[in-house]
Amino acid sequence: MITSANILEKEGKLDNYSDVVGLYVEAVRIELLKKIFEPFRDNPEYRKACNDWDRKQLIDEFLGNNKSVLHLYLTGAQTSMSINQLCEILLENVLTVEKTSPRGVGKLFFRHFFDTYNLRNKNKVIDLIQKFSGFRIKGYISNFVFTSTDVKKTKKITFEIFQNIQPKKIHERDK
C-alpha cells in the first residue's frame, strides 16, 4: 500500500489525491490490526480469557464507543475494524489508560500492548492516532478532494506512527 501510494504521489498532477491519502490510511489500519489486535485475539491465553467472559463483562472492561466492536472482533464474530475504531480503542484503552483502572481482559489488552511495543513518545503517538481517528469510514476519503499537500501531511503522520510504535526485541518480550 505504501509503495502504491508513493507511486501515485510521484506521478503528480492528479486532480484529486484522495486515492493516495486512502492508501496511507489503509496502510496504518492494516498495520495496527495485524500487529496489535490480531496477535492479541489469536493468543490462546487471551482468547480463552475473552471467550470465558460474557459480552456484558467484556464490554464493561473496555472504554469508549467501540467496545462492542472490539468484543465482536476478539470473539471472532467480526473479522476487521475501521481505522476510526482501531484508533479510538487504542486511545481509550491503552494510550490514555492512566485515567482509568483496567481490569480483567482490559488489563490483558493493556499488558499485551506494552509487553509487545515500545512507544518512543507517548504524547506524540496520542496526537498522531487522534489525527487518524478522523477517517471514519472508507467512503469518507473519496468524498473529498485532497491536494498534494494533504498527501504530504498524511504520509508524514503515517511514517511517524510507524516510527513511534516500535516492536520490542524478542529477548525483551521474554523477560
Image: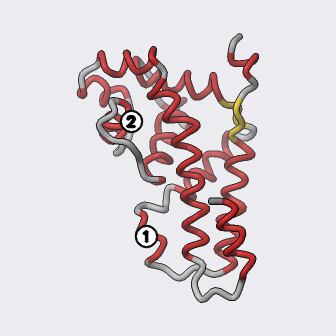
SS label for mark 2:
loop
C-alpha gap between disc 2 and disc 1: 25 Å
Looking at the figure, which quarter contains the N terminus? Answer: bottom right
Q: Is residue 67 left or right of residue 160?
A: left
When the figure is inspected, residue 128 is found, relative to residue 67, above or below; the finding is: below
Residue 57 on image: x %, y %: 27, 23
Closest to the camera, between mark 2 and mark 1, is 1
Check disc 1 and give the amino acid type.
Tyr
**Residue type at the position of mark 2:** Leu
Location of the C terminus (image quadrant): top right
> Is 142 located above or below residue 49 in the figure?
below
What residue lies at 34% left-to-right and 33% top-to-bottom?
76
Q: Residue at x 59, y 46 (%)?
A: 31
Residue that badge 1 annotates = 140
Q: Nearer the viewer, residue 34 or 71?
A: 34
Q: Is residue 44 above or below residue 145?
A: above
Q: Residue furthest top?
A: 175
Residue sitting at x 60%, y 89%:
15
Q: Earlier in the sequence, mark 2 or mark 1?
A: 2
Position of residue 169 measured from the top left corner of the image (x, y, whole percent): 75, 25
Residue 10 in percent (x, y) is at: 75, 76
Residue assigned mark 2: 63
User: Looking at the rendered structure, which numbered label has been put on residue 123?
Assistant: none
* Crowding near the residue tagged with mark 2, few <14, some 14–19, many ≥20 C-alpha atoms within 10 Å: many
Classify mark 1: helix, strand or loop: helix
How packed mark 1 is, by other alpha carbons closer than 10 Å (few <14, some 14-19, many 20 or more), is few
On screen, residue 113 versus residue 163, left or right, reads left
Q: Are marks 2 and 1 in contact (CB under 8 Å)?
A: no
Q: Residue at x 44, y 19 (%)?
A: 46
